[in-house]
Image (tube, grey):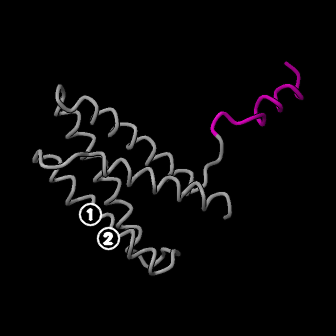
Amino acid sequence: MNATQQAQHAYGANAYPIRTPRGTEYDAFARVTGRLQHAENAAETDFADLADALHENRRLWALLAVDLAGDGNALPDDLRARLLSLARFTEVHSAKVLAGSASASVLIELNTALMQGLRDRGATA
């Protein structure tokens, strides 16, 4: 391998594309939402998987809430407040799902709507 080939190999196409923060958030929600969907479909046979998926979703929303509450968050205050309210809703509704009095489908819809918003804002930002 000559020097030119070595340089092309070293500086060629990166196997890991550069991700924007919005893209990273989208991917995290997509992964958790997929897990929730799978667990919701198998809830009768594998409640532990549903509980784990709910826990993972709660953790993701908690991380988002911490970021939203921080001084460095650049989102408009009204949007931050609405998202913080949704984070609280996620916490409360997850407890209802675990108690057997609610379905995880609302959480899946919420995450899907958030992902759509991330995708739409990504197209214009």
**Secondary structure type for disc 2:** helix
Amino acid on which disc 2 is placed: Ser
Camera-nearest residue between 93 and 35: 93
Residue 20: give x, y in percent of width and height: 60, 55
- The residue depicted at 38 percent of the width and 43 percent of the height is 32
The residue under label 1 is 89
| Placement of the C terminus among the 4 image quadrants | bottom right
Amino acid type at circle 1 is Phe
Residue 7's quadrant in the figure?
Answer: top right
Could you tell me if the residues under marks 2 and 1 are in contact, i.e. CB atoms within 8 Å? yes
For disc 1, the neighbor class at 10 Å (few under 14, some 14 to 19, many from 20) is some
**Residue 12 lies in magenta, yes or no?**
yes
Q: Position of residue 14 (x, y in %)?
A: 70, 36
Return the residue nearer the eye: 11 or 113. Answer: 113
Give the quadrant of the N terminus. Answer: top right
Q: Which residue is mark 2?
A: 85
Q: Is residue 91 left or right of residue 108?
A: left
Tell whether 112 sits left or right of 51: right
Which residues make up the magenta segment?
1-16
Q: Residues within 10 Å of mark 2 (few under 14, many from 20)?
A: few
Task: Give 33 or 5, whichever is nearer the viewer.
Answer: 33
Residue 25 is one of the magenta-drawn residues: no
Residue 83 spot, x, y in % from top left:
39, 68
Quadrant in which residue 81 is drawn: bottom left
What residue is at 28 percent from the left and 34 percent from the top? Answer: 39
Q: Is residue 10 left or right of residue 106?
A: right
How many marks the image carries: the answer is 2
Q: Secondary structure at mark 1?
A: helix
Q: CA distance from mark 2 to mark 1?
A: 6 Å
Where residue 66 appears, as percent x and y from the top left, is 35, 67
Extreme residue toward the left, this view: 99
Judged left or right of residue 39, residue 4 is: right
